[in-house]
Structure formats: C-alpha cells, structure tokens
Amino acid sequence: MKWRGHDPEYMVAQLIHALISEVEAHNKVFYAENPELAPKDPHPDYCGFGVDREYHGDIEYLYCIDERGTVTVKGVRYRGSSQSFKTLGKFKVGTTYDEAMTKLGDVAA
C-alpha cells in the first residue's frame, strides 16, 4: 500500500490511531500498577473515540481538523440542555504527544 503521509483524507485516521495508542499505553501501566481494577475481559476498548462530520451531545472533547492539518481541541461544557465550547489549544497533525500536551497546557494535567 502506498504511504499517503498526512493527506487530508488520512489525517483523521492518523489522529484517532494516535489517541487510541496513548490510551492503551496509559492503561497498560495503570492496570499493571492496579491489577484489581483491570477489566475481566481485556479486549481493546475503543469506546469514546468516534469520527463524524456532525456534533454529538455526549462528548467531553471535540477535535476539529482543518484542511491545513491544524487540530483544534475544544472542551465541551454542559448546562442543562445547552452546551458551549472552549478552545483549549491547537497543534499540527504529526506533532508529538509531548508537544501537543505542552500546547494544551493545564488541560493535559
């Protein structure tokens, strides 16, 4: 298969892959330190990650990717039946995890 790099068509897939990889790495360490909390069925859990062109009302973070490869991370605040968005930070697709967390600042802590 030909390498497509960071073509717009592949940016979302690459971002989702990176996010899931980070969660899996975190979970591996966490459950090694807390085996009593480990799930009994250790299959990969991809709940919480989705791709769509429309907003869904049950999310905590919204990742918007523009055609230039800029990822804008927005936090979602719920008040009753309404919600608002706050931009938490921006980074380019291909940015390392540590660099992205630095750009997101206190949100990553």
Image (tube, grey):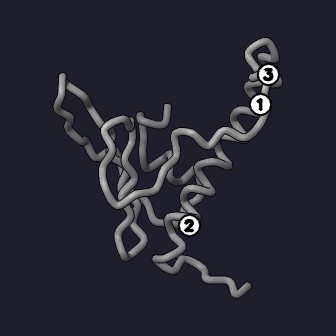
Disc 2, SS: loop
Check disc 1 and report its element: helix, strand or loop: helix
- The kind of secondary structure element at disc 3 is loop
Looking at the image, tell me whether mark 3 or mark 1 is earlier in sequence order: 1
Q: Position of residue 67 (x, y in %)?
A: 36, 75
Amino acid, disc 1: Val
Which callout, 2 or 1, points at the residue further toward the start of the chain? Answer: 1
Q: Which residue is mark 3?
A: 40
How far apart marks 3 and 2 lie (CA) works out to 34 Å
Residue named by callout 2: 94
- How far apart, in angstroms, are the residues tagged by discs 2 and 1? 24 Å
**Front tag of 3 and 2:** 3
Residue 91's mark?
none
Residue 90, x across and y down, in percent? 37, 56
The x, y position of residue 86, in whole percent, is: 25, 41
Q: Residue furthest top?
A: 36
Q: Tag 2: residue type?
A: Gly
Seen in the picture, residue 16 relative to 87 is either above or below; the reply is: below
Q: Residue at x 39, y 66 (%)?
A: 70
- Relative to 39, is 71 above or below? below
**In the image shown, does 57 or 106 lie closer to the viewer?**
57
In the rendered image, residue 49, in percent from the top left (x then y), is placed at 52, 46
Instruction: Tell me the number on the disc at residue 29.
Output: 1
Q: Residue at x 28, y 46 (%)?
A: 87
Graded by Cα atoms within 10 Å as few (under 14), some (14 to 19) or many (20 or more), the crowding at tag 3 reads few
Image quarter (top left, top right, bottom left or bottom right) of the N terminus: bottom right
Q: Residue drawn at (33%, 39%), measured in percent from left and top? A: 75
Q: What whole-number distance in Å separates the C-alpha atoms at marks 3 and 1?
A: 16 Å
Nearer the observer, 109 or 47:
47
Residue in the foreground of this view, choosing between 105 and 47: 47
Horizontal arrangement in the rendering, residue 38 relative to residue 45 (left or right): right
Question: Are the two marked residues, 3 and 2, in contact with CB atoms closer than 8 angstroms?
Answer: no
